Amino acid sequence: MVHTTMEENFLEGTLDFLSEFVSRQHCPPKEIISHLIRQMLLNSHQGEILKDTYMLLMKIQMLHPANAATVGWDWMLLKYIMEEQVLGTTCLTLGRDHPGHGLRNKPPGWLLFLQYVVQTLEDDFQQNLRLRMLQKSIAKKVLSCDKCFNNVKEVVEWLVIAVTGVGFSKPQKQPQETTPSSAEARAEHSSSAPCQASTDQAEVAPPAFFTQKVMLLLQRMLSIAVEVDKSPNCSSCKIADVIFPFILNIPLRSQREAFLNTMESQLLRCKLLELLFQHSCEVPTTLPLSLAKILYFLSHSSVLLQYQDETATWQKWDEMLQYLSLMLTSYQNVVLEHLRSSLNDRMDLIVQKAKPKLQDDDDISHLDIQLKIEDFISRMQQALGQPFPLQIMEKLCMLRELFLIITST
C-alpha cells in the first residue's frame, strides 16, 4: 500500500500509512526512509507535509536509530543541499540519477533535513561510543579527519558562509527559478573561498535566530569530527589549520565572536586561538600549548585581525583581551576534562578519577603573571595613552583573576 502511494506521489497517503505502520516492532526499510527524505522533506513546499514528514522521520529515528548500514541520506545529498541553500548555488540541468534531482526550486525543508542529519549522527555516535566501536559509526564514514577530510573542510566552508551571511539563502515560502546568469555569478563567487567579506553583510544576513541554528548544527558536526578518530589532538589541529585563513578574513568582530562562541569543541577553539595569537606575534614562540604560552601571548601579541577603518584602536586591544580570556578558559577545560585523549581513554580516566595531566610549562607563578600584566600595560600605554578605557581595564582585571584562580587550584 505504501509503495502504491509513493508511486502515485500521494504524499498524505504515504504519511498516513507509514505513521500507522511504524512501531517498535516495525521499521520501514532504508529505501522508504530515503524516499521520505528526498521526495518529501526536500521536495515539498507544503508546510504541513514538511512538518509531518520531519516528525515521522524523527519517530523512526527514536524507535529505530539509523546506523552506517541503514541511514537514509549520504554525503553527496547533504553536500548538494548545503551548496544549494547555504552557498546559493543552483544546478539547472541535473540528471535523474543526481542526488539533487528535482530539488532545484529550493524547497524550505533543508533546515529540517540538516537537523535530521545531525540527530542521526549524534544518536549513532553515542551508541557506538557506549560500545566502544566508533570505527563503525556514521561519523567515521562521513566526518573522519583520517578517512574523509574533504568532507570536514566542506563543513568549515558552510559554517563560515553561515556566519558571514555571504551567499546565505534563507528558507523560502515560494519556489523561485534561478536564471543561468545569476547561477553562474554565484558559482564564481563561491569558488573564491576564503574570501574577504563585504561591508554590507548585515543587509544580506539571515535573521539571527536562523543563523544561530545553522551555526550550532554545523559546530556540532565539527565537534564530532574532532572526536571520532583516535587522536582528537591531531584532528583539532587539522581542522584549526583549515579554519584559520577563513577567520582572518572575517572583518566584523560580532561575526568572529559568533564563530568562536558557538564552537562546541573546547579543544578546537583552543587550537584556533593558538594559531591566531601565534600569527600576531612578531617573534613566535616554540612553547607548547600551555599556561606559559598564553602568558607569552599576553606580552607579545599585537592586534589580531583585520578591522574596519572606523574601529577605534582601544577596541582592537579589547577584542584581543577577550580572546585571551576565552583561550585561557578553554585551555583549562581541555586539561581538566582530558580532551586531548581519545574518547575511549577519556572514559577510562574519568572512571579512574585520574588527575589532570599538567605540563612543565603549566607551572607559572603569581609573579610571572604580574610581570606579564605589567608588560601588557606598558605596551598599551604606548598605543593608547592614558587613561585606559574602562572596558580594557575590566577585561585585564578579569584575565588576571582567571590566571590567579587557575594557578591556585
Image: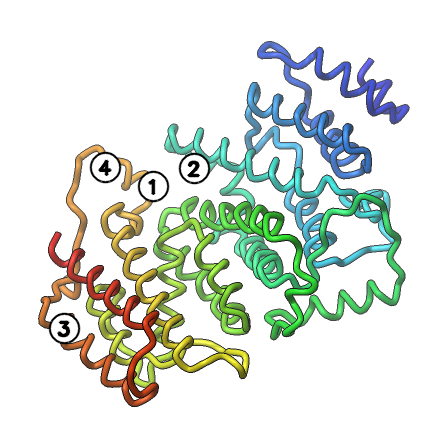
Task: Count every numbered label the image shows and give the total.
Answer: 4
Residue located 25% across and 65% down the image: 399
Tag 4 secondary structure:
helix
Taking the image as shown, residue 226 lies to the left or right of residue 325, namely right
Q: Nearer the viewer, residue 223 or 231?
A: 223
Q: Would you name the residue on which mark 1 appears?
A: 343
Q: Are marks 3 and 1 in contact (CB under 8 Å)?
A: no
Q: Is mark 2 on a helix, strand or loop?
A: helix
Q: Name the residue under label 3.
A: 370
| Disc 2 + disc 1, Cβ < 8 Å | yes
- Viewed as shown, does residue 31 lie left or right of 241? right
Work out how far the residue at label 3 is from the one at label 1, CA to CA, in angstroms. Answer: 37 Å
The label nearer to you, 2 versus 1, is 1
Distance from disc 2 to disc 1, alpha carbons, whole Å, reads 9 Å
**Horizontal side, residue 65 vs residue 346: left or right:** right
Tell me the SS state at disc 3: helix
User: Who comes first in sequence, dot 2 or dot 3?
Assistant: 2
Residue 124 coordinates in the image, percent (x, y): 50, 32
**What type is the residue that disc 1 sits on?**
Leu
Q: Position of residue 140 (x, y in %)?
A: 49, 42
Residue that carries the numbered disc 2 in the rendered image: 134
Q: Mark 4 points at which residue?
A: 350
Pointer 3 or 1: first along the chain: 1
Identify whether 334 is placed above or below 9.
Answer: below
- Residue type at mark 3 is Gln
Question: Which marked residue is nearer to the observer: mark 4 or mark 2?
Answer: 4
